[in-house]
Amino acid sequence: MIHQITLPNSAFLGNFEKFLTPNTFPLDNTKVDLTSPYKWVSLHPLVSAMLAPISHKSPFLSSVITIHNSLDLEDFFSKTLPSYQLNSQDLLLTKYILSELTRNTLEHASTPDGVTLALTHSVKTDTLRLGVSDRGVGIKTTIRRLYPDQTDYETIITALTPGVTGTTNFSGGNTQNAGAGLFFVKSLAHQLGSHFLLYSGTGLFKLLKRKTIRSILKPDSLEDHASGSNDFPFWHGTAVGVDIPLNKITDFNTALTQIRAKFMSSTEPKAQFI
Amino acid sequence: MTHTIVLLPLVHDFAQNKDIATSIRQKEIMPFLTKNEEVILDFSGITGSTQSFIHALIAEPLQIYGTVALKLLKFKSACPILQTLIGLVIDYSLI
């Protein structure tokens, strides 16, 4: 029997569940057929990044690129990214997010297939939408050694916590990782008041769009203005979507500085007074 | 003796390649710090980077040698973004 995935007429990060809930995803890389009762569909590039590697060619999907190493990403930065004509701060922000997300996959996903990346620019909302997906082992497997009893959703929350890395529980990390990458990306989305979605196994965490500009950055993702649960169709790997409203950040360094302060305040060893 | 590493030809204007950072750390930074020699990391022309890259570049010497590494490591022409990321990695590596 041919595995089919049904696409809704619209699926963006705000209503991503419309794409996930009616479907199941293959456990291996067997190609699936994409169908839709709608003639036209409008999808977040994360849908394309997830489905392109496991589906037959489909007009529903936007173009994707496969990244196998940092040199591929460098190539993407020099050849493709300039076509989006981003201002200097948005360019830094976009490179930062894509670098951290793809590197995370290349180091932790344990898959030879690399990471699939897709971008679209919405002229109407002046938003750059990013999707990064892999078919690797997923977050739960990556940090299982240190957190063996957690569900997929709980491991996502753990992975977003400052200072938590799957490779070590030593404060400050090891020579290669510090457990800051995902926290920084989520925090950048928070400062933009924008969507950030992290999906792995049956767990999904979604930072919700905020209408108010002011909001306190929180180290504990359970305290974020967010939704999520552990009852989604199983995705073999990890998928991340971020929306970047363009021309909103005037100084990327100011954003980084605020996140740095929050990261440090939540990872400093706390004195135990008895 | 001072050893200077010019990073731009190795990592381009946005420094994100952790493999290169690791190689620089292992081949160009650690051997000199071990001999108590000064290392200058020259960031001229680099406009941005990631926390992960800076971590791969300098966290190990900071974890091993602590504040002694800070006296031997110099950061030349680091833009504000790089200064923020370098400061962050120093902060948590010396906890």
Image (tube, coloured by chain):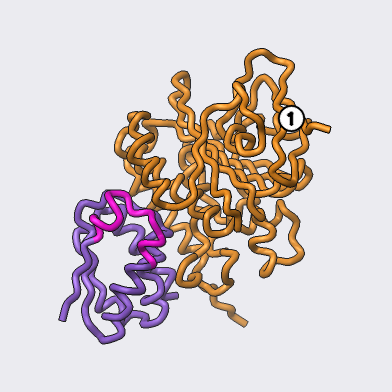
Q: In which quarter of the image is the N terminus of chain A?
A: top right
Residue A92 lies in quadrant: top left
Q: In the image as oriented, which residue stretches furthest toward the bottom?
A: B35
Instruction: Give how far across and how far down residue B30 sits, in percent.
Output: 33, 78
Question: In the rendered view of the protein, which quadrant contains the C terminus of chain A?
Answer: bottom right
User: Type of residue at label 1?
Assistant: Ile
Horizontal and vertical percent position of residue A155: 68, 57
The tint of chain B in the picture is purple
Residue depicted at 50% across the width and 49% down the height: A101
Highlighted range, magenta? B7-22
Q: In this view, does A208 lie above or below A102?
A: above
Q: Is A25 left or right of B26, judged from the image as shown?
A: right
Residue B9 in magenta stretch: yes
Write the residue at 60% across / 34% down: A52
Q: Nearer the viewer, residue A148 or A7?
A: A7
Name the residue that disc number 1 marks. A5
Q: Which one is in front, B60 or A162?
A: B60
Q: How busy is the neighbourhood of tag 1: few (under 14 within 10 Å), some, or many (20 plus)? A: many
Q: Which of A83 and A100 is in front in this view?
A: A83
Counting every numbered tag in the picture gives 1
Q: In this view, does B23 lie above or below A204?
A: below
Give the x, y percent position of residue B54: 37, 62
| Residue lying farthest to the left in this orientation | B1
Please name the color used to draw chain A: orange
List x then y, in percent, for residue A144: 69, 64
> Is A46 inside the magenta-drawn segment?
no
Which residue is at a point 33% across and 40% down the rendered structure image? A78
Q: Does A260 sit above or below residue A21?
A: below
Tag 1, which secondary structure? strand
Locate residue A121: give its quadrant.
Answer: top left
Given residues A261 and B77, the one toward you in this image is B77
